[in-house]
Amino acid sequence: MTGILVLYIVAFALFIYGLMGLTGPRTAVRGNLIAAAGMGIAVFATLLIPGVSNWVLIILGILIGTALGVPSAKQVKMTAMPQMVALFNGVGGGAVALIAWVEFNSTAGFTLEPEAHVVVASLFGAIVGSVSFWGSLVAFGKLQELIPGRPISLGRPQQIVNALVLVAALACAIAIGLGNGSPLLILGTLIFAAALGLLVVLPIGGADMPVVISLLNALTGLSAAAAGLALNNTAMIVAGMIVGASGSILTNLMAKAMNRSIPAIVAGGFGGGGAPGARELGDKTVRETNAADAAVQMAYANQVVVVPGYGMAVAQAQHTVRDMAKLLEDKGVEVKYAIHPVAGRMPGHMNVLLAEADVPYEQLKEMDEINGEFNRTDVALVIGANDVTNPAARNDPSSPIHGMPILNVDESKSVIVLKRSMNPGFAGIENELYYSPTTSMLFGDAKSSVESVIEELK
Amino acid sequence: MTGILVLYIVAFALFIYGLMGLTGPRTAVRGNLIAAAGMGIAVFATLLIPGVSNWVLIILGILIGTALGVPSAKQVKMTAMPQMVALFNGVGGGAVALIAWVEFNSTAGFTLEPEAHVVVASLFGAIVGSVSFWGSLVAFGKLQELIPGRPISLGRPQQIVNALVLVAALACAIAIGLGNGSPLLILGTLIFAAALGLLVVLPIGGADMPVVISLLNALTGLSAAAAGLALNNTAMIVAGMIVGASGSILTNLMAKAMNRSIPAIVAGGFGGGGAPGARELGDKTVRETNAADAAVQMAYANQVVVVPGYGMAVAQAQHTVRDMAKLLEDKGVEVKYAIHPVAGRMPGHMNVLLAEADVPYEQLKEMDEINGEFNRTDVALVIGANDVTNPAARNDPSSPIHGMPILNVDESKSVIVLKRSMNPGFAGIENELYYSPTTSMLFGDAKSSVESVIEELK
Amino acid sequence: MFLANLAILVLAGFVGFAVISKVPNTLHTPLMSGTNAIHGIVLLGGIVVLGLGHDLSVFDKLLLVVAIAFGTINVVGGFLVTDRMLGMFKGKQR
Amino acid sequence: MFLANLAILVLAGFVGFAVISKVPNTLHTPLMSGTNAIHGIVLLGGIVVLGLGHDLSVFDKLLLVVAIAFGTINVVGGFLVTDRMLGMFKGKQR
Ligand SMILES: NC(=O)c1ccc[n+]([C@@H]2O[C@H](COP(=O)([O-])OP(=O)(O)OC[C@H]3O[C@@H](n4cnc5c(N)ncnc54)[C@H](OP(=O)(O)O)[C@@H]3O)[C@@H](O)[C@H]2O)c1
Ligand SMILES: NC(=O)c1ccc[n+]([C@@H]2O[C@H](COP(=O)([O-])OP(=O)(O)OC[C@H]3O[C@@H](n4cnc5c(N)ncnc54)[C@H](OP(=O)(O)O)[C@@H]3O)[C@@H](O)[C@H]2O)c1
C-alpha cells in the first residue's frame, strides 16, 4: 500500500501544480498536460493495489470509455464545447451515483457497514452525483438544442416542487442511514435526486448554461470527494475537493463577468433571450441602411472595428467576416476586432470563433485595449453583438446590466449594426445605441448580410 | 482524541484564513487576530489530550513565556521590529531543538523508537531548529548593534568551513539514526548545528538581515513541521509547513524587491554599507549648500517632496522632519513624502517611522504615485536616502542595482541631499545624482541638519 | 483515519480556493473544462470497488463497468477538450 | 498514519505557496512576523512531550519548560508585534 499512497500524493501534487498552470495564459497548455499526467499516475497506482481482480471488466470499462470519449472530444466543433463539457461532467457525476448504488447493494444496504461516515458520504455522493448527471444532461440538451433553450418552468409552484423532491430524496437517504436496507430506498434516493436535477436546470435559460455547467462541475467535484471519503481514497478526496472548491469560485467569477448572481440564475426564468415587454420603442426612430451604402462607408474609412457577438456565432459568419476584412485591408482600411470578455455565450467564445477563421491574433483587441480607440474609429461594425455594446450599462443605473463594462462603440464616428430584427439580446433589454443618429441598422442574418457587403466591395 | 483532532482542523483552518487576510492591507489586522484565535484553539485542544500531566510545569513554562514575551513585544520601538522578529523566530527554533533533545533522552537515543520517520524527523528538527536559533541570535545582535553590522567573515575558507561543520552535524545525526544512543552524539548534532548557524549569518551584512530573518523564519517553520511529523501532531505539521512554504516565497519576494539574490546574500560579505573603493570621485564636482540657503530655497517653493531613507531612521529625524514640514506648510508650501518600497532596512520602514511621527497619511505617496510629480516639484529634499534615488538603476546596466525601480528625484527642478558624507549607501555604490548641477548637498547628521533648517525658517 | 481524511479534505479545499484567485475571463471556460477533467478521478472508485469487491452480483458488475466507462469518458474527454480549447487561444501562449 | 501526514504536509505546502502569491511590498514585514508567530505552534510539542512523557529526568523536564516558554514567547510576542506593526500602517486599513 505504501507505494500506492506515495504515488497518490505525487498524483495530486501534479493536479494542483497543473491547475496553477491553467490559471495563466502562458502556462495553461502545459498545466493541462501536467494534470493529465497526474491522472495517469493515479490510475496506474490504483491498478497496483494488491488483490485487484476482475481485470477483464475493468479493462473493458476503460476501453469503452476511451472509445466513446476520445472521438467525441476530438470531433466536437469548437462552438459546441460548452455542451461537451456538460456531458463529460454529467457522466462523472453518474459514475459516483452508480458506485454508491453498488456500495449499497454489496453491503446489503450498508447494514454490514460499521462506520457512519462511510454511509453518509456514500449517500451524499449518490444524491449529488445523480443531480449532477441529470442536470448536466439537460444543460447539454439545451445547448445542443435538443430541448428548447428558453426556460421550461412550472411557474410559481416550481420552487415548492423542487423543495419537496429534495426532501423526498433526503428522506429515502435518511431511512437508509437509519438501517433500513430495502433496495427500493436507494432507487428512491437516486430517482428523486434525478428529478431534482431535471427540475432545477429545465427552468434556466440556455444563455445561463455556462454558469450552470460550472456549478454542476463543482457539485460533481464534491460528490467525488465524498466517494473518496467513503472508499478512504486520498487521491479522490483531494482531487474531488479541489474541483469542488475551485469550481465554486469559478462559478462566481463567471456569473460576475456577465453580471448575474448565482441565486438569480438558479431561480431561473432568465436569459431565454427576447424576453417580452422589452420592445417599447416609444417614438424613437431607427435609421436603416443597405449593403451597398455600408460597403461604401467602410471602403472609405481609415479604421473599421469589427464588434462580434453571439449573433455572429449563431450565423456562423466568422469566415465570411474574415474575407470581408481581407477585402477592406486590400483597400487600405485598417481592420481590428474588439473582443468583449463575455461576448457570445461562453468566455472566450469570440476568440475561439475568430481563431477558427484564422484571424491574425494581432488584430484581436481586448476590451480595455480597444475602448480608447473608438473615438479614432470611422466605422464600428457590430455583428450580432448587443448587450456588450449597450450604453445603458454605463448610463442607466436602473438597467439590469448596469455596471457591466462594455465596448464604447457609441464613441466611434459611425456605427453599423448587423442583426435580424430589433429583438433584444441575452439580457432581454432595449439597446439605445440603435436609436443614436450615428447608428444605422443592416437587418438580416449576419452571414448573408456580410456576404452581400462583400459583393458590393468587389 | 476525535474532538481534539477536530479542534486542530478548525485551528489550522483559521491559520490559513488568517494568513490569507494578512496578504491584503485592508484585511491584515483582522487576519492576524484570526490566526491568533486559531493558535488559542490549538493550545486549548492540546491541553485536553487525555492523560496530560505535569500541569504545574506546563503552566509555569507558559507563564514564563508570557511574562517575557508580552512586555518585550509591547515596548519594543517600531524601528527595532526586525530584530524583535528575529528573536521570536529564534526561540521558536530553539524550542524545536530542545524537544528533539528530550525525545532523544527519553527514548534512550531513539533505540526504543521503532518508526524510522520519527527518528529522521526529530533529528532534522534538532539540526534546523538549532541553526535557526543561533542564526537568529546573530541577526538580532547585528541589528541591535551588539555585534558590528559589517560582515564578519573568515574570508576565502568560509564556505569550506561551513560545509565541514554541516557534514559534522549530519555525521552525528546519522550515527544516531544508525542506532548509536550515546548522549554525546545528540550534543554534537546540536552544537555543530549551532556553529553552522553562527558561521552562516555572521558574514552577512546588517542590511541583508531582513531577508536572512525571513529565511530563518521559513526554516523554523520546516523544523516545526518535522517536529509535528515526529509527534504525529496534525496542527504542528500543517502550521509548520505553511510557514515553511510561504516563508520561502516571502524571502524570495523580499530579496527581489531590493534586487538581491538569496545565494548572493547567503554567500555574504555584502551590504555592510560604505564598501571600500566606492569613492573614486573622478573630477566630478559636488555643490555644497548650507541650512540658510536650503531654508530659503524651500520657503519659496510651491511643492517640496521629502524623500526619506535609511539615514533618517539612523538619525531618528522623523519628528524633526515633521516639524519642518509644518513650518513650510504654514508658509503655503505643499509638502509630500515619497515612500520607496525598500527605503530603509525593512519593507515599510519609512511608513512606520513617519506614522510614528504622525505625518498625515494623505501626505505619504507610494513610488508609482509620486514619480509622475517630480517634474512639477521645485525642491526634492532627500533625507538620508541614497540607493533608492540613484539614477544608475535606470541608466547604467553595469550597476549592481540596475533594474531596481527608483524615485526619479533627478527630474525635479532642484534637489537638496542631507547626508553626513559622500559615503555610499547599502549597495555601496556611487550616486551620480550628487554630481548633477541641480543637486546641492547639505552635509551633517540628518536630524541636526533639519533642526538648523528649522531655525532658519523661523 | 477518517479524521486524517477530514484534515486532507479541508486542506484540499483551501488549495482549490487559493489557486483560483483571479483568472482572466478568457480562461474561465478552459479552467472549467480542466477541473472537470480532474474530477474524472472517480474512475478510481469504480476500479477499486470492482477490483476488490467480493461476490458482486452480475448487475453490480454491470453498473461498475458503466461507472468505469463514465469515469474514463470524463477523464480522457475532459483533458482532450481542454487541450483543444487552449490550442484555439493561439498567440495567448506567446 | 505517516503517509496521511505526508499527504497533509504536501497539501499544507501548496496552501502556503498559493496564498503568498503577490503581496504588496509594505506588507512583507508584517507577513514575515505573522507567519513567524504561527510557527510558535511548536509550543504544542513542548506540552505534549512534557504532559505525556513517562519518567522524564529532572533535566529533561527543565529543557521542556524552557521549550514551552520559548514557544509561548514566539506565539504571544509574534502576534502582538504583528498587530502593532499593522497598527502603524494607518490609513492602509481604510
Ligand atoms: N460570454 C459568456 O460567457 C456568456 C455566457 C452566458 C451569457 N452571456 C451573456 O450574453 C450576452 C453576450 O452579449 P452579445 O452582445 O455577444 O450577444 P447578445 O447581447 O445576446 O445579442 C446577440 C444579438 O445577436 C443577434 N442575432 C442573433 N442571431 C443572429 C443572426 N443569425 N444574425 C445576426 N444577428 C443575430 C440578436 O438580435 P436579433 O435576434 O435581432 O438578430 C441579438 O440581439 C451578454 O449579456 C452576456 O452577459 C455571456
Ligand atoms: N527596505 C528594505 O526592506 C531593505 C532591506 C535591506 C536592504 N535594503 C536596501 O537598503 C537600501 C535603502 O536605500 P536608502 O536610500 O533608504 O538607504 P541607503 O541607500 O542605504 O543610503 C542611506 C544613506 O543615509 C546616509 N546616512 C546614514 N546615517 C545618516 C545620518 N545619521 N544622517 C544623515 N544621513 C545618514 C548614508 O550616507 P552617509 O553615510 O554619508 O551619511 C547613506 O548614504 C536599498 O539599497 C535597499 O535595497 C532595503
Image: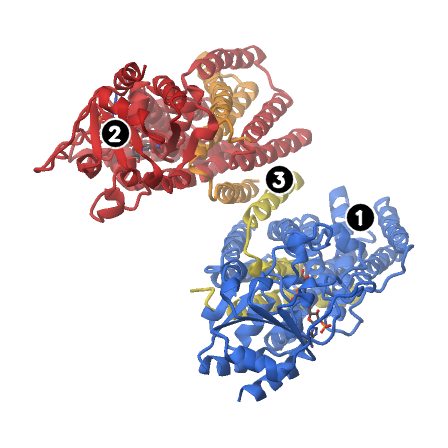
Chain colours: A blue, B red, C yellow, D orange
- From the viewer's perspective, tell me whether residue A250 is left or right of residue B229: right
Secondary structure beneath label 1: loop
Q: Chain of mark 1?
A: A
* Residue marked by disc 1: A112
Q: Which residue is the site of mark 2? A: B416
Tell whether B145 sits left or right of D85. left
Judge by depth and name the residue closer to the eye, B147 or B55.
B147
Disc 2 and disc 1: Cα gap in Å?
A: 85 Å
* Amino acid on which the number 1 mark rests in the picture: Leu
Quarter of the view holding residue A404 = bottom right
- Mark 1 or mark 3, whichever is nearer to me: 3
Most foreground residue, C21 or B200: C21
SS label for mark 2:
strand
User: Where does the image place residue A169, in percent across and percent down from the top left?
Assistant: 86, 52
Return the x and y of residue A369 as percentages of the image width and height: 49, 60
* Mark 1 touches mark 3? (CB < 8 Å): no
- State which chain disc 3 sits on: C
Is residue B345 rendered to the left or right of residue A269? left
Residue receiving disc 3: C7
Instruction: Tell me if label 2 and label 3 are in contact, CB under 8 Å.
Output: no
Quadrant position of the N terminus of chain B in the picture = top right
Q: Real-space Cα distance between discs 2 and 3?
A: 59 Å
Closer to viewer: mark 2 or mark 1: 2
